[in-house]
Image: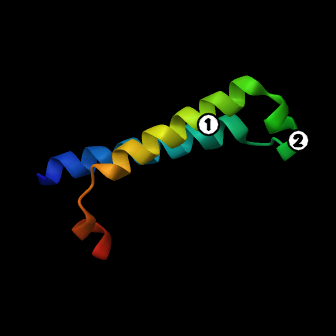
Amino acid sequence: MPYRDWLFRISDILDAVAAAQKYTIGMEFEGFVADRKTVDAVIRNFIIIGEAASHIHRRLFLF
């Protein structure tokens, strides 16, 4: 995988983490699970994280 490609994947992961944090900041667990829109948004970002991570070569994780 070219250097640039995995950097984009890492950037996607960091963006998705930031978005999930933004959606849930200040929320208690009970409030989170009661808010279906927030749950769906966070799940979507978990999917983005997983998809991006699956395209990063395993050798990069050895650092």
Left or right side of 29 for 39: left
- The residue positioned 80% from the left and 37% from the top of the image is 32
Counting residues from the N terminus, which is met first, the one under dot 1 or under dot 2?
A: 2
Q: Quadrant of residue 41?
A: top right
Mark 1 closeness class: few <14, some 14–19, many ≥20 residues within 10 Å? many
Residue to which mark 1 is pinned: 42
Amino acid type of the residue that numbered disc 1 sits on in the rendered structure: Val
Residue to which mark 2 is pinned: 30
Instruction: Please name whichever residue, 56 or 23, is drawn nearer the observer in this view of the structure.
Output: 56
Give the Cα distance between marks 1 and 2.
15 Å
37 versus 43 height, above or below: above
- The residue positioned 45% from the left and 45% from the top of the image is 49
Q: Position of residue 28 (x, y in %)?
A: 85, 44
Dot 1 and dot 2 residues touching (CB under 8 Å)? no
Q: Position of residue 10 (x, y in %)?
A: 34, 50
Counting every numbered tag in the picture gives 2
Say which element carries label 1.
Answer: helix
Amino acid type of the residue that numbered disc 2 sits on in the rendered structure: Glu
